[in-house]
Amino acid sequence: MTSAVERLMERAKDCIARGESSMREAAEHVAEAMRLDNKLTQRAVAKRIGKSPAWVNGLIKWRVEGYKSETPFGPQSKASRKKAAAVQATKRPPEKFTPERLLRDEARADRDTAKASAAEARAKASEAKRKAEQAKQETEAERLRTNRLMAKGTGDISYQDRELLLKFLGMLGSKYEGERAVAAKKSSCWSARFRLALTLTSEEAAFTLAGL
């Protein structure tokens, strides 16, 4: 490689180092060096300027085609390089492993565990409260049902039977002896049937049954 070719290679390398704005100048230097030394291959040029043979081939092809695109490798390549540079700029170097970092990570893990445990405890307490309230309501409903069935020592009395019994009890206060006798007989039968002691007056008995 002659001194002239060597100088052209150095200039091309410097142009490449300056960036895309100097790529055309670099391509001209490479082309001139290869014209002066017809034994100078793309592989040799690549080795001299620190690029791959494919990169040199793209640079030469770009020149031959009249520099139609902005860069030797087209706008997509430029955009990719810009994107890669932006990503690289935002990347932070990995944090070194230190005792302080270990303590910080452990404290964060403890806080997360405490939060999860507290949330679980709140959920369990809420479920226990709900079940207790449900049991209370069921107990109260059963108590009311039992009271209705067993009130004043009576058994189950349907609505129709209740109305009929009230009618008989009302007849006990009739001014007619025959009606009082019939009412007493019927009431006695109903007393045995429903376990109701007829020791009350007709007005008291009627009041008692009306509350059932």
Image: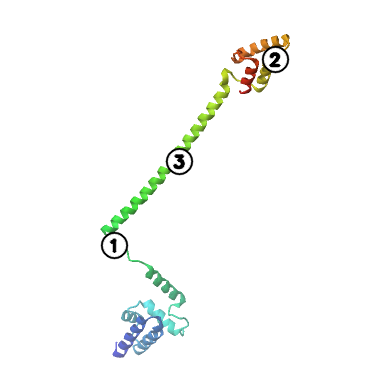
Instruction: Classify mark 2: helix, strand or loop.
Output: helix
Kindly identify which residue carries mark 1.
Answer: 96
**Of the residues shown, which amino acid type is indicated by label 2?**
Met
Q: Find residue 164 and report its horizontal and vertical position in percent.
A: 68, 18
Mark toward the start of the polypeptide (2 vs 1)? 1
Kindly identify which residue carries mark 2.
Answer: 171
Task: Tell me which residue sits at (53%, 26%) in the image.
Answer: 143
Q: Find residue 73 and report its horizontal and vertical position in percent.
A: 43, 77
Labelled disc at residue 139: none
Q: CA distance from mark 1 to mark 3?
A: 44 Å
Mark toward the start of the polypeptide (3 vs 2)? 3
Kindly identify which residue carries mark 3.
Answer: 126
Mark 3 and mark 2 residues within 8 Å of each other at the beta carbon: no
Front position in the image: 113 or 43: 113
Task: Tell me which residue sits at (64%, 11%) in the image.
Answer: 188
Q: Find residue 168 and report its horizontal and vertical position in percent.
A: 68, 15
Q: Nearer the viewer, mark 2 or mark 1?
A: 2
Q: Is residue 36 above or below residue 165?
A: below
Q: Is residue 203 above or below residue 65?
A: above
| Mark 1 crowdedness (10 Å alpha carbons): few <14, some 14-19, many ≥20 | few
**Of the residues shown, which amino acid type is indicated by label 3?**
Ser
Instruction: Classify mark 3: helix, strand or loop.
Output: helix
Quarter containing the C terminus: top right
Residue 166 occupies quadrant: top right
Front position in the image: 70 or 128: 128
Residue 174 occupies quadrant: top right
| Mark 3 crowdedness (10 Å alpha carbons): few <14, some 14-19, many ≥20 | few
Mark toward the start of the polypeptide (1 vs 3)? 1
**Of the residues shown, which amino acid type is indicated by label 1?**
Lys
Instruction: Classify mark 1: helix, strand or loop.
Output: loop
Front position in the image: 86 or 142: 142
Q: CA distance from mark 3 to mark 2?
A: 58 Å
